[in-house]
Image (cartoon, helix red, strand yellow):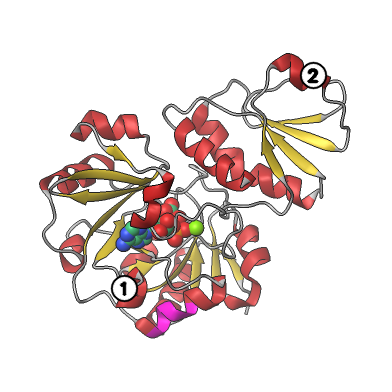
Amino acid sequence: MEQLVKSTEENIQRAAEIIKKGGLVAFPTETVYGLGACALSKEAVVKIFEAKKRPHFDPLIVHIAHREEVDRICHDIPDQAWQLMESFWPGPLTLVLPKNETIPDIVTAGLDTVAVRMPAHPVALRLIECSGCPIAAPSANRFGHISPTQARDVLSDLGKAVDLILDGGRTVVGIESTVLLVTNQGINLLRPGGVSTEDIERKVGSIKIITHSQKILSPGATKIHYSPRVPLYIFNGSPQELERINEPHLVIMSPIPLSHQSMKVFPLSQDGNLSEIASHLFEEMRTLERMRVCAIIALPVEKKGLGRAIMDRLTRASA
Ligand code: TXA
Ligand code: MG
């Protein structure tokens, strides 16, 4: 049987049977591809860590298809969490909340909180529904590599370790969800992502942004992450300084089109649109990696709106 298949209803049913039997299915979401297993089965979830070579201290996100399922997974849910679900679900927002016993410890790396999200993708939602259980899923890349935005990326990273890959084309958002820790004492941003902090603050007022030294709150937020297999440098100089660099074996990854005397330029958007830049970022990194360029010089964007998440990913890729 083929391993990478189109996301037809028939194939989603097949995938759901695999999940029910404790297997692994990679599926599209609006952010990146996920590597899913039944979140209620310890034996199934172990396979995710093995396939990704992911350390067990890094907890997973549990994906649900209906808001009522949150009550089965979490308890003592703050009012602000309900407000956030109302405003941003389904969508690229993950909420970390107090965990119920139904979720095995391996999913949350032993923490007493669990990360939950409802993805805005018909294939993901249908798969969760047909599987009859919440689905634990990290990004479907090998640990430390760039998150996959296409089905073929999953195949090249994980190969035979995954039972079935549902192909849903390119993901739209292109970077992972925003992760928030929501408590009655306030809201902490653990990972910037597909929903901007400005949009969140417009709904629930100001939130706390966790800096790197405090990142122990989010065990997965290690500094080196999302790395392409070629060196990436963020360029913080002036346009004149950039123009003076004469290194024809390097390439420039730029938010907008531009020309350079010696280096080839790969623009991520036509006009600096941040959604477009985010949606092309990981795909372009993988393309440049396949081209075996010597190094990538990435030009920064302003840390506003989605720019915060884009700079977070670029900074990690350059670590
Ligand atoms: O867009 C996404 O979020 C994708 C798609 C597949 O949904 N998933 C994803 O999962 O990016 P992953 O495992 O690559 O990232 C999950 C992040 C990690 O940084 C992890 O540390 C954090 O969420 N996380 C999960 N559970 C947590 C918890 N209980 N407390 C704090 N952080 C948690
Ligand atoms: Mg990941």
Where residue 157 sits in the image (x, y, percent)?
A: 64, 65
Residue 44 among magenta residues: yes
Task: Give the residue number, with chain letter if any, for mark 1.
Answer: 110
Q: Which residues are magenta?
A: 43-47
> Could you say whether the residue bearing mark 1 is in a helix, strand or loop?
loop
Q: Nearer the viewer, residue 191 or 265?
A: 191
The amino acid at mark 2 is: Glu
Quarter of the rendering containing residue 100: bottom left
The answer to whether residue 272 of the structure is visible from this angle is yes
Q: Position of residue 198 (x, y in %)?
A: 32, 29
In this rendering, the answer to whether 101 lies above or below 297 is below
Is 64 magenta? The answer is no
Dot 1 amino acid type: Gly
- 47 w.r.t. 182: above or below: below
Mark count: 2
Q: Is residue 218 left or right of residue 71?
A: right
Q: Which mark is residue 243?
A: 2
- How far apart are the two marked residues, 2 and 1, measured between alpha carbons? 51 Å
